[in-house]
Image (cartoon, grey):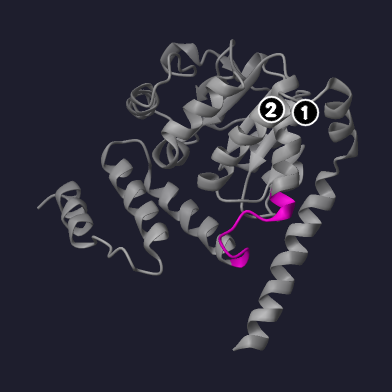
Amino acid sequence: MDKTQDRKSRSVRGIVPENHPRRESILIRERLVEALDKDVVVPQGLIAQGRGECFDYLIGERTRDFAERAILEAAVLLVEAKNPVISVNGNVAALVPREIVELADTIPAKLEVNLFYRDETRERAIEKVLRDAGAKEVLGVGEDASETIPELFSERRRVSRRGIFSADVVLLGLEDGDRTEALVRMGKKVIAIDLNPLSRTSLTANVTIVDNVTRAIPALRNKILEVKGLREDERKKILTSYNNREILKSAMRFMADRLSQLSLDL
């Protein structure tokens, strides 16, 4: 039995009962394993998911007020942007393909594939997932990724001229610190979704949504619909009153306080 067949067999054996307390978490893992078989996700993406899940436990697997404040700021930035772009990696494509396409249509924004572990087979696989989910255009695939982000040396440096390279606001889901830093140096506003408030991505981004991408993307779409109904002065007030460092501090304090409380409840 080859590795793909073995993974599929284990997936079938791992059918989760409706009343299982970890059902949603396990189903997310199953989706990533299936995406691994389709060249959408690499094994390293499974490790990233596990790391994020640990931090999700610390916030009680719920969207907290610090994430809601960041989501509001992100919604205003995306609505006000001239050329907003959503960067998509394998995990995002595997976990929220329909939701990410709906978000792009609502803003509206461009979708661009950008990968640390890049090859054209994987780019095409992610493009297919997005198009199957309703995307009309997907940038950053093949020769379209012809521009280079300065001072970045991983494969993430390759971007589309019409997308990330010329964007004024970039939304990064499940991202790495190097590219976040490079994009900020280019003068772009960067919105990151990262469950780890201590990561370089979180600390460098202009707006950090400390939340699970499976919750953050639908919540962001809903907030954008609300923001579109605000007056211009109301949007500006939101932008000028936001402090990302305070958001990260709130997230860290919440995690620390919750751990302390849980230890008392044992």
Left of 236 or right of it: where is 200?
A: left
Taking the spot 41% from the left edge, 16% from the top edge, the residue there is 142
Q: In what element is the residue under mark 1?
A: helix
Of badges 2 and 1, the one in the foreground is 1
Taking the spot 70% from the left edge, 28% from the top edge, the residue there is 183
Count neighbours of disc 1 (C-alpha within 10 A) and say few if under 14, some if 14 to 19, many if 20 or more: few
Q: Earlier in the sequence, mark 2 or mark 1?
A: 2
Disc 2 to disc 1: CB gap under 8 Å: yes
Left of 132 or right of it: where is 262?
A: right
Q: Is residue 31 visible?
A: yes
The amino acid marked with disc number 2 is Glu
Q: In what element is the residue under mark 2?
A: loop
Taking the spot 64% from the left edge, 22% from the top edge, the residue there is 149
Instruction: Report the front residue among 69 and 91.
Output: 69
Count neighbours of disc 2 (C-alpha within 10 A) and say few if under 14, some if 14 to 19, many if 20 or more: some
Kindly identify which numbered label has been placed on residue 67: none
Left of 243 or right of it: where is 64?
A: left
| 242 magenta-colored | no
Kindly identify which numbered label has been placed on residue 151: 2
Q: Is residue 175 visible?
A: no
Taking the spot 77% from the left edge, 65% from the top edge, the residue there is 253
Q: Quadrant of the C terminus?
A: bottom right
Q: In the rendered image of this protein, does residue 103 appear above or below residue 194?
A: above
Instruction: Report which residue position mark 1 lands on.
Output: 185
Q: Is the stretch drawn in magenta largely helix, strand or loop?
A: loop
Q: In the rendered image of this protein, does residue 83 appear above or below residue 123?
A: above
The amino acid marked with disc number 1 is Arg
